[in-house]
Each structure stands twice: as structure tokens, then as C-alpha cells.
């Protein structure tokens, strides 16, 4: 116990003397949590739209006004013909071109149908699909309005229509921050927890101090505990800081129990630090450790379910998300913060992450040998 | 009982491609100051790492104070002090913190064993709040020695302790070793400085993982079979070239301000004919005399390096 106490004292001293490490530990998360959620936003706004109005009628004007007043679209230009509008797409000045054909109003009134041409620049897939989706629903809505104006009240009963009203549970306003901020916090805890631990033992290797440690009677698990505990404490501090930022900057208050969040993060940190430790036992230099961590963090980033839903991934990718701990943390974080889940709901997740932690740490301890 | 024994120790790297230690056997007596002398890459560090339980030998066995380096490694770690060739204390901790840390790790305190390190520590005391990374080379080495001594080890392993240290500090360091030896500590030290070899009780000349000679420095020198001559002139470069053209020369090489050489047949007659030969070649201020070999001469001879120009 006395050895462990001194090991911890030494580690904390070294951490607090390492100014760049402290900066990275606390400044990076603050900046990222404040900046990233604002930028990494899925709500598509400012779609540049060009109209080719060949009709110049009251109806065509109404449609254009309705589209522009939705707030999602910005008028790029009104062009006299489709060719001029297509040039705008080529020059990347317009994302969508709507062509309103000649006799739009007349055909609509006399024949009851009319066709509209919508051309979308699909280079940015998200913008294209979301933008044309918005546009379609606006045109649909416009269409319904016209029908209501025409159809005689007596005929309403004869033409039943189904109106769909969706209500969004757990996140009624579909707040993007509520979805994203907890996820980014998870990513930060993972990055800092994993990377810091992976750097630490490698640093002793590079400085040669591990040689000196290895000839002492220090026990393996003492040494490794001495490495892990300080970063576990820092990880908890970082998480607390993140929760505070979420509350102050984004007004996110976890619906579920904060204690439950801490319970999960405590287990999760052990797992992710075991992962960092494993990397550091396989690396000879900090550079190697960083490259290796970077490789895995990329996978965590894109496959953890932070940006894209896991359910829409192919089957083989789902297998990967099952074995990376971060996907469980993101799930649990959203469950507790947004849905207010209880202990029983997240228990399976805790157990899986705990199991991963045991495996990773055991592997790391076995792989860290004092003799070669 | 011997403090250290090695029996047919062999160690290879890269799956046998590199032979670092080649079937070495020797023993070091208790209280002895034993020197491993050899150039870089001779296998000295591998021997240290095997004896300090950091490296497993491929073949053979070794003991330190009766403990097997493989089976009883844990016991060995408690009774040896090791100073690796590279400074390997925590650069971001102060002198005092490093010392306290290593004392604790060995389950003792600085206070308890202060008498062991007192002589050395008094020199460090003025810098005790300085970070180890900010110390001068000589001070770093003193601190490393203190940390290796803090748990009163029975055997001290010092791997090239004086490499990169100035002449005065080197001298001081060897005086410290002499005092530690007087306390009965067995010391195994490696160096590539030949002048330090004479300060050891016994030396092993080692090259390519093999021991070329193992004896006291005096015996090593006495075992030098040929007569050794020292020659100098005003133009040393020309002199060396001229000497090499002579058929009677067994070997010759530059050694400090002289050229050391030995003859195939060291008779008075041959000596005279050589000086005559050199005078004919137009050497001015020629000095030719017999000289006592040094450890370095013994080493060069063992290398069989006839055209070496080691200094």
C-alpha cells in the first residue's frame, strides 16, 4: 500500500508538472464541446435555390413565396430559362433548380394536374437529399392548400384523406444539441482516457526510466495501478467539466440520474484505459502509440453511432460496433440524458463494458513484462 | 562464495540473427571491483541486463549472490543496484523526489540508509530541489549512483557510468567506487575507457560477445608477449606510413603522441636496423624507445587489429 501511495504521488506530481498535458486535458475538451456541436449540425439550412419561372402567374408566384418563406432556402437567382439555371449549378451557386413550366396555372385549373421539374446538385449528398425532401413537402403542402380552396365543402366527406401527425418522444423539439452534445462528450472522454494512458508507459520506455523501475521489486499490478488511477481521476474530472458545459452552454440537464451516469463512466474509464494500456505495451515510442490510438479512434468516431445510426449500418459493421466500447457509452449516455432510463435498463450495457474492461486490462498486464 | 557467476551464457537477438553474448562463463568474488572492458556493441550491456533480470538468456545459467537470474529474479531485484548506461531517473522530479521515490520502491527510507549515500549526497545537497533533467552530466551520474545505492545493495551493476562525463568527475567517480568497495559491496562496472581498467581488481576484455582475456590489470599487461616500442618523429603521418613498409614489423598503430609497434623478432640487431631504416627514410627528431604495454595495447593486440589507429 505504501508503494502504491508513493507511485500515485509520483504520477500526480509528474502530471501537474507537465503543462502541455494539462492544457490538452482541460482546454481541448472545453473548446471542442463549445465549438463542435455548433458546426457538426445536421439541420440543413441556407440551401441555394434557383427558380426558372416560365409561367409568371399568381400560382407560380405563390409557390415561390411559400418555398422561400420556409427559412431553409435562399434565393440564388431567378433565371429566364433552364440553361442559365443549370450554369448556376455548375458554378456551385445553386443547389436546387425548380422549373415552373409554361401554363402552370392554367393546366392546374383546367386539367387538375401539372408537373414541376426539380433538379438537385447531389455532390453533397446530405444537402441534396434533405433539401429536396424539404422542397417536396413544401410543394405537397402547397398542393393541398390549392385543393382545399377548390373542393366544395360538401365533397369533403367523399374524399377522405389521411393526415399524419408525428410526435417526437424524448426529444419533442428534435433538438440537435440534445442529441449531439452528450455524444461528443463521450468521444472526448474516450480520446483523452485512451490516449493519455497509452502515452504514459511508453513515455517511461522512451525516457529509459522503465529500466530502473523494472530492476526494483515493484509489483506489476502496483505499477499499472499507479498509472491508471491518476488518469481515472482526471477522466472523472473531465466528464464533470463536460456535464457542466452541457448544462451552462446548451441547457442540457440529464433527465435520468446523474449518479447512474457516473457509475457507468467509472466502469467505462477502466475499460478505455485498459485499451490505452494495451496499446502502450505494444508500442516502443510515443509516436507509435499515438498513431495506433489515432487509427482506433477513427473507427470509434465513425462506427460508434455518434454521427450515423448503428441500425442503418451493414451487418458486418454492426458486429464491429458490438465490440467497441464507445458504442455502449453513447447509447447509455443518450438513454440516461434524453430518455431518463433507469439502472435496470442500462445494466446489460454496464456488464458488457465491464467484461471488456477485464479482458483488455488482463491482456495489457500479461503483455507488460518486466523481463524480455 | 562468488557474488556473481555466469555459466555458458548465450544471448541472441532477432531470432538468432545477432549473437550478442557467446557462451560466456566467469565469476566475480564478493567485494570485488570487476571491470568489463570492450568497445560499443561488445555485449557488455546484454550481460548487465541478464544479470539484473531484465533479459532472459537463451542458454546457460547465472546467479547473483546465489540466486538464479531466471527463477529467483524477485530476490535479485531487492539486493542489486543497477545504473543503466543511459540516465534513467525521472527528469521531471527533483533530486530529492527521485531519491525518496526509489527508497520507497525498495521498501526503505532515505533517512534509514543515509550513511550509505552520505559521501555522495553531500555533493548533491545544494541542488536537492532542482529537477533531475536540469542537472549537469556529473551530477546526474552522482544522483543515479545514489538512487542505485539507497537500498544498501549487495551487488552494484554500473553500465558505462562514466561515458559522457568530464575527466574530473570521472576521477571523483572512481574514488567513490573505491570507497564503496571498501564497504564490501561487489561492483561490476563496464567501460570503454581503457585508463579506467587499471582501477579494477580484475578485468575481462570482451569483444563480439566473447571474453578475450580475464585477469588482473597487472597480469593482463604482463601477459603481453612481445616487446613493445614507442616511436615518434616530427611527421607522424609519414612515420606511420614508412613503418608499415618495413617487413620486420609485427604490428603498429598510433597511441597518443607515439606510435606503438612490435617486431617479429625483437633482437637488438633488428631494433638498430629499424632505426637505421627510418633515418634513411628521412625522419627527423626520431625518438625510439621500449615501452611498457597498457591495457589498451593488450586490447588492440587481442583484436588482431594490425592497422588500427585507436587512440
Image (cartoon, coloured by chain):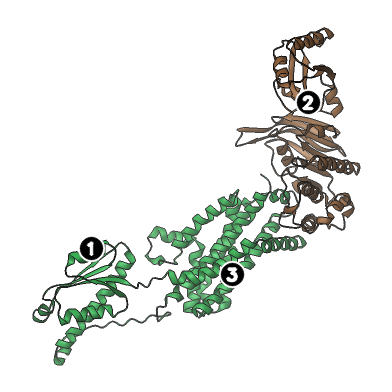
Chain colours: A green, B brown
Residue at the bottom extreme?
A: A154
- Residue A363: x %, y % from top left: 59, 54
Q: Residue at x 59, y 61 (%)?
A: A273
| Quarter of image, res A189 | bottom right
**Depicted B51 relative to depicted B265: above or below:** below
The quadrant the N terminus of chain B occupies is top right
Residue visible at 70% across and 31% down? B209
Name the disc covering residue A238, or none.
3
Q: Looking at the rendered structure, which numbered label has been put on residue B257?
A: 2
Occupied quadrant, residue B168: top right
Task: Point out the frontmost of discs 1 and 3.
Answer: 1
Residue density around tag 3, few if under 14, some if 14–19, many if 20 or more, within 10 Å: many
The tag earlier along the polypeptide, 1 or 3, is 1
Q: Dot 1: what SS? A: helix
Report helix, strand or loop for mark 3: helix
Asked if residue A368 is positioned above or below residue B267 in the image, the reply reads below
Of helix, strand and loop, which one carries label 2? loop
In three-dimensional space, the C-alpha distance between marks 2 and 1, rounded to whole angstroms, equals 86 Å
Q: Compare residues B80 and B253 and report the one nearer the observer.
A: B253
Image coordinates of residue B67 in percent, x first then y, are: 79, 43
Which is closer to the viewer, label 2 or label 1?
2
Residue A223: x %, y % from top left? 69, 57
Q: Is residue B225 visible?
A: no
Query: Is residue B119 left or right of A357 when viewed as pictured?
Result: right
Provide the residue designation for mark 1: A87
Report, in whole angstroms, how far the alpha carbon at label 1 lies from the one at label 3: 51 Å
Q: Position of residue B165 (x, y in %)?
A: 77, 42
Answer left or right for A201 relative to A85: right
Residue displayed at 18% across by 66% down: A82
Question: Label 1: chain?
Answer: A
Amino acid at each position: 500500500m505504501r508503494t502504491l501511495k508513493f507511485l500515485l504521488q509520483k504520477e500526480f506530481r509528474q502530471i501537474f508538472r507537465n503543462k502541455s498535458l494539462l492544457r490538452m486535458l482541460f482546454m481541448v475538451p472545453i473548446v471542442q464541446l463549445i465549438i463542435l456541436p455548433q458546426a457538426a449540425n445536421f439541420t440543413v439550412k441556407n440551401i441555394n435555390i434557383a427558380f426558372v419561372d416560365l409561367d409568371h402567374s399568381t400560382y407560380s408566384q405563390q409557390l415561390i413565396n411559400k418555398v422561400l418563406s420556409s427559412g431553409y432556402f435562399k434565393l440564388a437567382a431567378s433565371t429566364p430559362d433552364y440553361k442559365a439555371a443549370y450554369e448556376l449549378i455548375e458554378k456551385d451557386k445553386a443547389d436546387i433548380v425548380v422549373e415552373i413550366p409554361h401554363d402552370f396555372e392554367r393546366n392546374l385549373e383546367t386539367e387538375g394536374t401539372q408537373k414541376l421539374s426539380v433538379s438537385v446538385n447531389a455532390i453533397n449528398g446530405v444537402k441534396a437529399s434533405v433539401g429536396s425532401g424539404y422542397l417536396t413537402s413544401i410543394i405537397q403542402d402547397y398542393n393541398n392548400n390549392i385543393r382545399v380552396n377548390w373542393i366544395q365543402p360538401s365533397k369533403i366527406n367523399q374524399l377522405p384523406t389521411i393526415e399524419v401527425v408525428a410526435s417526437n418522444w424524448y426529444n419533442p423539439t428534435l433538438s440537435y444539441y440534445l442529441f449531439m452534445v452528450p455524444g461528443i462528450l463521450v468521444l472526448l472522454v474516450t480520446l483523452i482516457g485512451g490516449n493519455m494512458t497509452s502515452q504514459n508507459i511508453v513515455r517511461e520506455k522512451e525516457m529509459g526510466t522503465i529500466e530502473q523501475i523494472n530492476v526494483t521489486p515493484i509489483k506489476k499490478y502496483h505499477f499499472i495501478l499507479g498509472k491508471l488511477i491518476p488518469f481515472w481521476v482526471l477522466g472523472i474530472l473531465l466528464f464533470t467539466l463536460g456535464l457542466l458545459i452541457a448544462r451552462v452552454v446548451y441547457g442540457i440537464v440529464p433527465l435520468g440520474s446523474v449518479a447512474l451516469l457516473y457509475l457507468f463512466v467509472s466502469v467505462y474509464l477502466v475499460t478505455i484505459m485498459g485499451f490505452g494500456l494495451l496499446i502502450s505495451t505494444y508500442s516502443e515510442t510515443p509516436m507509435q502509440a499515438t498513431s495506433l490510438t489515432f487509427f482506433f479512434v477513427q473507427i470509434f468516431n465513425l462506427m460508434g453511432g455518434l454521427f450515423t445510426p448503428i441500425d442503418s449500418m451493414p451487418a458486418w459493421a454492426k458486429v464491429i460496433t458490438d465490440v467497441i466500447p464507445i458504442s455502449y457509452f453513447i447509447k447509455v449516455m443518450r438513454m440516461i440524458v434524453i430518455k431518463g432510463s433507469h439502472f435496470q435498463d442500462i445494466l446489460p450495457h454496464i456488464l458488457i463494458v465491464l467484461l471488456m474492461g477485464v479482458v483488455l486490462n488482463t491482456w495489457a498486464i500479461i503483455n507488460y513484462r518486466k523481463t524480455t | 562464495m562468488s557474488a556473481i557467476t555466469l555459466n555458458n551464457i548465450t544471448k541472441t537477438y532477432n531470432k538468432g540473427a545477432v549473437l550478442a553474448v557467446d557462451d560466456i562463463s566467469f565469476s566475480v568474488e564478493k567485494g570485488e571491483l570487476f571491470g568489463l572492458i570492450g568497445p560499443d556493441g561488445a555485449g557488455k550491456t546484454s550481460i548487465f541486463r541478464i544479470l539484473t533480470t531484465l533479459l532472459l538468456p537463451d542458454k546457460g545459467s547465472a546467479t547473483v549472490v546465489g540466486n538464479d537470474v531466471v527463477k529467483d529474479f524477485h530476490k535479485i531485484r531487492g539486493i542489486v543496484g543497477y545504473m543503466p548506461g543511459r540516465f534513467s531517473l525521472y527528469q521531471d522530479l527533483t533530486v530529492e523526489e527521485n531519491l525518496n521515490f526509489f527508497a520507497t520502491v525498495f521498501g526503505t527510507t532515505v533517512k534509514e540508509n543515509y550513511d550509505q549515500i552520505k559521501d555522495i549526497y553531500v555533493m548533491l545537497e545544494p541542488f536537492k530541489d532542482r529537477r533531475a533533467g536540469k542537472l549537469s552530466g556529473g551530477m546526474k551520474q552522482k544522483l543515479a549512483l545514489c538512487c542505485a545505492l539507497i537500498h544498501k545493495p549487495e551487488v552494484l551493476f554500473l553500465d558505462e557510468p562514466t561515458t559522457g562525463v568530464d575527466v574530473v568527475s570521472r576521477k571523483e567517480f572512481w574514488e567513490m567506487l573505491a570507497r564503496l568497495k571498501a564497504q564490501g559491496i561487489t561492483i561490476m562496472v563496464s567501460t570503454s575507457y581503457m585508463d579506467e581498467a587499471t582501477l579494477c581488481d580484475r578485468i575481462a576484455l570482451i569483444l563480439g560477445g566473447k571474453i578475450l582475456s580475464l585477469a588482473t590489470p597487472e597480469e593482463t599487461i604482463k601477459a603481453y608477449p612481445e616487446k613493445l616500442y614507442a616511436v615518434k618523429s616530427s611527421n607522424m603521418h609519414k612515420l606511420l606510413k614508412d613503418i608499415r613498409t618495413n617487413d620486420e614489423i609485427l604490428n603498429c598503430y598510433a597511441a597518443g603522441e607515439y606510435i606503438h609497434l612490435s617486431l617479429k623478432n625483437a633482437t637488438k640487431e633488428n631494433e638498430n636496423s629499424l632505426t637505421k631504416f627510418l633515418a634513411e627514410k628521412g625522419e627527423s627528431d626520431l625518438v625510439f624507445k621500449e615501452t611498457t604495454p597498457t591495457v589498451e595495447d593488450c586490447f588492440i593486440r587481442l583484436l588482431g587489429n594490425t592497422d588500427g589507429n585507436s587512440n
